Amino acid sequence: MPQGEVDEFDGILDEFEDKEGGSQGDFNKAIQDTLNNLNLNDSNDATDESDENLDEILESVMGELLSKDVLYEPLKELSSKYPEYLEQNKPPKLKHEDFENYSKQFGYVKDILKVFDNDGKDGKDSNDSKATDKSNVLDLMTKIQECGSPPKEIIGDFDSNNLFNEYSIQLEPTTSSSSAEMPLVNHPMPEAPDLSILIMIPIIFVSALIGLLIVIPVIGVLTRHRAHFNPKGVSLDPESNPTVGPNVDTYFKMAKRVKEVEGLAGFFKGFFPTLISEIFIGLLILIPLPLTLSAGFLGYFAAIVGLIFIGCVSLPFEIFIKRAIVTPYNLPVLTPRQNIRKLVTPNELSNPFKMINATLLQVLALRILISAVTIHILRPFLSVIPLFGMVSWQVLTVALILLINPLDVLQTRLMVQPLGQQDWDEETNHNKYEDAVVTIRQQPYHGVGDALRAIKEDEGTGALARGWWFTLVGQLAIAFSP
């Protein structure tokens, strides 16, 4: 290299040393200036000599990147993590293709470490030997990159300046001195948005809609069956069993009556209130969800508060849904104000809390208490008994329908029996409708004991067993849950 070029190159290096403490942009600029000054213009007679110097610099840089001082420690740490990962993630947990690639990577990493470990041990210290080692390391590093990125579980602790990060360094040979740019960094392509979530949202919505269309007719007939007031009549024949009004004492008789009086549309009464309730309650559940997923006391406390909050909000919805099912009136979707007047008495409209009377609260409290004692006390206590402990708990859980089903019947009646029915006007009084499917008891119940006794005396013990099969299904699900 001519002395003039040497002086110019030394000057550039001095400038770079002065900027060493500067920003990353200054560093890149210094490197680029160095490369530009080494590329002579067309009028320079020393082009070939400059190209040779540039090749020497590139070889020096590549030699530093592939040296033992730079690669050994990261590769050593990487090799220590591969065996455990491969042992714990054998197919089918990992795809066969991924598992083979990771296994190959592990082999290449061990081969590079072997090259470094054997450096100098064979007694050879020639330039040819070192060049061969660097060539082998470069070839192995290339093979590692061809296998793809290492598992994130392994390189998760490496920072962005370490060996394997989001970017892969590619050293490309420069074939001409006129090349103005050297592609050193290959940025990854941005990941495409995950469309699975966008696809799942309408699928979930349509599935819930179809589920409601199947469940609403079943729940609608069950609600009418339990709510129907069918008192005993008076007869001189002791063997007869007369009733006041139509005798609808079974589930299928009620379904037949709904079909005769209201047609197929009657089976879907309460659909829109139920749909609105499901959407609204579903959104409310998302509010305490992050806290309930927390570990420890905070998650437990958030779950309890969330259940109480959701229960308080869902109770008025359930009352409206049951009343919308038993009412003999049509409830157009576009007239919500008129619909409310048909479902809520003037007395309740002035004070909405009257819809939730003391007897209803007692029934709900007893229902929650029975479930809590059965699941959280009796199950752990009986499950420790060998052989018959779990079976005893399952039998007890199923037998509880004798207590739970009367409470379910009473809960339905309390929800559809508005307080202050004497305040209804002629237009909205349910029982004055000539052809109503369900008759509502006019006199209110006072307490759980009074209500159960009144139902037994007025309609017989069979009225307390209405819909027992529905309660049985729920108890069987609890009894045989894991």
Image: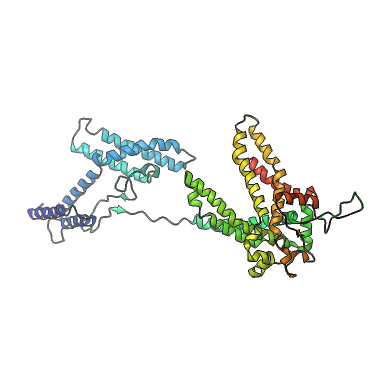
Q: Residue at x 39, y 35 (%)?
A: 83
Residue at the extreme right of the image, as rendered: 236
Percent x, y for residue 316?
Answer: 62, 59
Q: How is the image coloured?
A: rainbow
Q: Is residue 102 above or below residue 220?
A: above
Q: Horizontal placement of 31 versus 271: left or right?
A: left
Number of numbered discs visible in the structure rendering: 0
Quarter of the image where one finds residue 337: bottom right
- From the viewer's side, name the closer residue of 257 and 173: 257
Percent x, y for residue 11?
Answer: 11, 55
Q: Is residue 481 visible?
A: no
Q: Is residue 301 above or below residue 263?
A: above
Q: Horizontal placement of 343 versus 20: left or right?
A: right
- From the viewer's side, name the closer residue of 173 and 83: 83
Q: Is residue 422 above or below residue 458?
A: below
Q: Is residue 53 visible?
A: yes
Percent x, y for residue 18?
Answer: 14, 54
Quarter of the image where one finds residue 129: top left
Q: Residue at x 38, y 41 (%)?
A: 154
Percent x, y for residue 127?
Answer: 18, 38
Residue at the extreme left of the image, as rendered: 3
**Quick one: quadrant of the C terminus?**
top right
- From the viewer's side, name the closer residue of 278 and 345: 345
Quarter of the image where one finds residue 330: bottom right
